[in-house]
Image (spheres, helix red, strand yellow):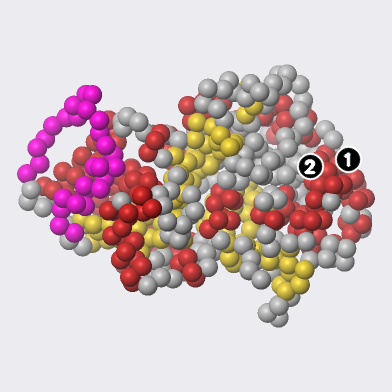
């Protein structure tokens, strides 16, 4: 039997005072809260739990294996990976709103002056030093600036020893680690003793993908580097070019940058980018994004996933320069940045409704049903409204009946009746999961408990968890039996809420 995903830890809800984005220093400070009702409560200072700055709140778990197809599905549920750790934020309680963002060259119909300058500056630098005469001149208005053509010509027009990019495996090398350490200590100000070989391997070399997607022959890598630049893959759209890669940038045969990327069935996903601070003047970060947009198209992929977009964080909101769309984790639909801009400004949570789903403003709404069958997009011409306040605000409908729903679930699943139900009489914004669930009862993107309750009634829950297998520690596994193992049932229940039913349509191995 083959598994699409092998999970090696329980789902964890991780809270921390340390946020690498806002550092608990937002201005105004109440903008750390996701919705205006909580911001107003913070300013009133009358609710003890809302008198302090919100935590960094992350939901995650460790995996041993995940197929590229499965990981792409999980990206469309808001997940990212750090090595083999899959995570996503609790958008309601986290101090920053991290929205999955994706784009492609089609979103940049008219390259900005800054984008043209980034490419022209680098082109001039590598050709000047190569002894070639570069004619200086400004962009002619009305004349199209073809990003794809300019990026590809960067390597065509110079000697490879001057500048080249090479796609290779994610295996460790001393050269890669030296650049990583230089970048982390000089750009991110990490202490040198904290930047270890093990942390580099764990973060940027280890992957959850099977050997068939990561271990290839020298001929494979040679063909990949040759054919993507020639346009072969753009025309043929091969489905066997999958897996993690390092794309290395060389200047005068010296490694100056590394793009850590995942090639997935329909997309290219950026994991991390490292650059030599000695070449900060070349704008390698912006150049790499443009380069990876072109790589996406040349590999025959539809979207370039740039990680997370945070509207009120300069480290992350620069991604809007490349156009694209962000994920509404509750509707499982993407919305263009142009449409979403006014709703997510100043770090607000947004749950979108279009004019086909009209709800009365200020009327409490229950959590919306999560449809895992498709990943959609909002009509770019639709009139959108934000119903996050009506669902998740201080008077939102999501909190009003959830405790009663938990009680019903416990009664329907006899294995859970041994747990104490007294803890579930009330659900609150600051409740972060104890007792039955290690996850909050209410959190954007989790399968709502009312929906889980319906699945139990309809037999869907029982059908889905029959695809869960447990590893017994002796190189064998057995099908999970919910009736005899209530402790594992709790963990499987959490995992289903987090990953959604589509992942559970195929066998899952749980090794805890």
Residue at 65% across, 63% down = 7
Q: Is residue 126 magenta?
A: no
As drawn, 10 above or below 294: below
Residue found at the very far bottom of the displayed protein: 474
Is 112 in front, or is 420? 112
Circle 2 residue: 451
As drawn, 239 above or below 212: above
Q: Is residue 152 magenta?
A: yes
Residue at 90% across, 45% down = 408
Of badges 2 and 1, the one in the foreground is 2
At mark 1, the secondary structure is: helix
> Around disc 1, counting alpha carbons within 10 Å, would you say few (fewer than 14), some (14 to 19), or many (20 or more)?
some
Residue 317 appears in which quarter of the rendering? top left
Please state the extent of the stretch shown in magenta in the rendering.
Answer: 133-160
As drawn, 451 above or below 1: above
* Distance of label 2 from label 1 (alpha carbons): 13 Å
Quadrant of the rendering where the C terminus is positioned? bottom right
At mark 2, the secondary structure is: helix
* Residue 59 placement (x, y as % from top left): 64, 51
Q: Earlier in the sequence, mark 2 or mark 1?
A: 1
Residue at 69% across, 63% down = 507
**Which circle marks residue 404 in the picture?**
1
């Amino acid at each position: 039997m083959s598994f699409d995903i092998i999970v090696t830890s329980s789902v964890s809800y991780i809270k921390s005072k340390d946020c690498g984005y806002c550092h608990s220093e937002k201005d105004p400070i109440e903008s750390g809260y996701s919705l205006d009702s909580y911001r107003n409560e913070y300013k009133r200072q009358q609710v003890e739990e809302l008198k302090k700055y919100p935590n960094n709140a992350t939901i995650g778990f460790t995996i041993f294996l995940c197929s590229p197809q499965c990981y792409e599905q999980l990206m469309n549920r808001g997940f990212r990976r750090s090595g083999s750790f899959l995570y996503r934020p609790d958008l309601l309680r986290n101090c920053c709103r991290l929205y999955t963002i994706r784009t492609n060259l089609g979103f940049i119909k008219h390259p900005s002056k800054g984008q043209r300058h980034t490419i022209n500056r680098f082109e001039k630098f590598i050709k000047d030093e190569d002894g070639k005469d570069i004619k200086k001149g400004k962009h002619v208005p009305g004349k199209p600036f073809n990003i794809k053509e300019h990026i590809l010509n960067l390597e065509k027009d110079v000697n490879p020893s001057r500048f080249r990019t090479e796609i290779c495996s994610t295996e460790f090398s001393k050269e890669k680690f030296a650049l990583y350490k230089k970048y982390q200590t000089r750009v991110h100000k990490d202490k040198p003793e904290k930047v270890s070989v093990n942390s580099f391997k764990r973060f940027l070399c280890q992957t959850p993908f099977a050997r068939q997607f990561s271990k290839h022959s020298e001929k494979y890598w040679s063909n990949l580097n040759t054919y993507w630049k020639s346009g072969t893959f753009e025309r043929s759209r091969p489905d066997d070019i999958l897996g993690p890669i390092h794309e290395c940038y060389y200047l005068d045969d010296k490694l100056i940058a590394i793009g850590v990327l995942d090639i997935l069935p329909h997309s290219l996903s950026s994991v991390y980018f490292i650059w030599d601070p000695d070449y900060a003047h070349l704008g390698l970060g912006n150049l790499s994004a443009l380069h990876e947009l072109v790589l996406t198209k040349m590999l025959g992929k539809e979207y370039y996933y740039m990680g997370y977009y945070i509207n009120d964080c300069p480290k992350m909101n620069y991604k809007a320069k490349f156009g694209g769309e962000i994920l509404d984790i509750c509707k499982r639909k993407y919305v263009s940045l142009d449409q979403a801009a006014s709703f997510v400004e100043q770090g607000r949570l947004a749950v979108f409704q279009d004019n086909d789903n009209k709800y009365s403003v200020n009327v409490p709404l229950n959590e919306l049903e999560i449809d895992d069958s498709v990943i959609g997009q909002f009509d770019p011409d639709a009139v959108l409204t934000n119903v996050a306040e009506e669902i998740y605000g201080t008077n939102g409908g999501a909190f009003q009946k959830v405790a009663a729903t938990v009680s019903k679930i416990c009664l329907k699943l006899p294995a859970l009746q041994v747990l104490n139900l007294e803890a579930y009489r009330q659900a609150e914004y600051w409740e972060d999961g104890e007792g039955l669930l290690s996850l909050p009862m209410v959190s954007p993107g989790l399968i709502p408990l009312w929906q889980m309750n319906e699945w139990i009634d309809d037999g869907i829950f029982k059908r889905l968890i029959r695809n869960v297998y447990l590893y017994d520690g002796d190189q064998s596994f057995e099908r999970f039996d919910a009736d005899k193992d209530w402790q594992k049932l709790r963990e499987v229940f959490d995992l289903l809420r987090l990953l959604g039913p589509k992942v559970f349509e195929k066998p899952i191995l749980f090794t805890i």
